[in-house]
Amino acid sequence: MNRLDHLLVLTIGVYGLCYILMYGSIFNRPRNFLMRKFSWFRRLITCPLCTGFWCGAFMYQWHLVPQVKINKISDTFSDTFIFPFACYSAIFCYACHLITEILIAKAYPSIKDSRCSREEEGVDDSDFQI
């Protein structure tokens, strides 16, 4: 695989991780617990820009750094691009989240009525799945 293939796989993986962390039912209990306990976590996990940034930083370290070491490219490559890739993934996750929200609103017009405000999200262990 060349670098562009890795970037494509990593980009899709970052959005998948971001979406699962934000909305995946498998993480409902730990997410709701942490959201009740820490207000900063609620602001972090409900923001696709913030979650996308940290997912990008994590996935870059997990996916690209081993590739750099296997292909014997200099380590400055791996250290230099963590922040730009995290910013790239934040923008990508935010844009994909907006597109997903628009598509959900078009497909399910009554979803706006059933959603709670961002400040109340995750407070009562409710599952607002479609």
Image: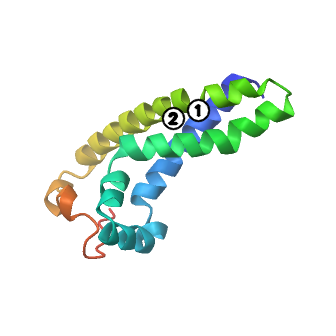
**SS for tag 2?**
helix
Q: Which residue sits at x=76%, y=28%?
A: 75
From the viewer's side, name the closer residue of 107 and 65: 65
Q: How is the image coloured?
A: rainbow
x and y percentages locating residue 9 in the rendered image: 64, 36
Q: Which residue sits at x=18%, y=51%?
A: 109
Crowding around mark 1 (Cα neighbors within 10 Å: few <14, some 14 to 19, many 20+) is: some
Query: Looking at the image, is 63 positioned above or below residue 8?
Result: below
Q: Residue beneath label 2, please?
A: 86
x and y percentages locating residue 39 in the rendered image: 29, 62
Left or right relative to 108: residue 94: right
Which label belongs to residue 116? none
Labelled pair 1, 2 in contact (Cβ < 8 Å)? yes
Left or right relative to 77: residue 127: left
From the viewer's side, name the closer residue of 66 and 2: 66
**SS for tag 1?**
helix
Type of amino acid under label 2: Ala
Quarter of the image containing the N terminus? top right
Q: Is residue 115 visible?
A: no
Q: Residue beneath label 1, please?
A: 82
Left or right relative to 43: residue 51: right
The residue sitting at the left extreme is 113
Type of amino acid under label 1: Ile
Please identify the quarter of the rendering in which residue 42 is found: bottom left
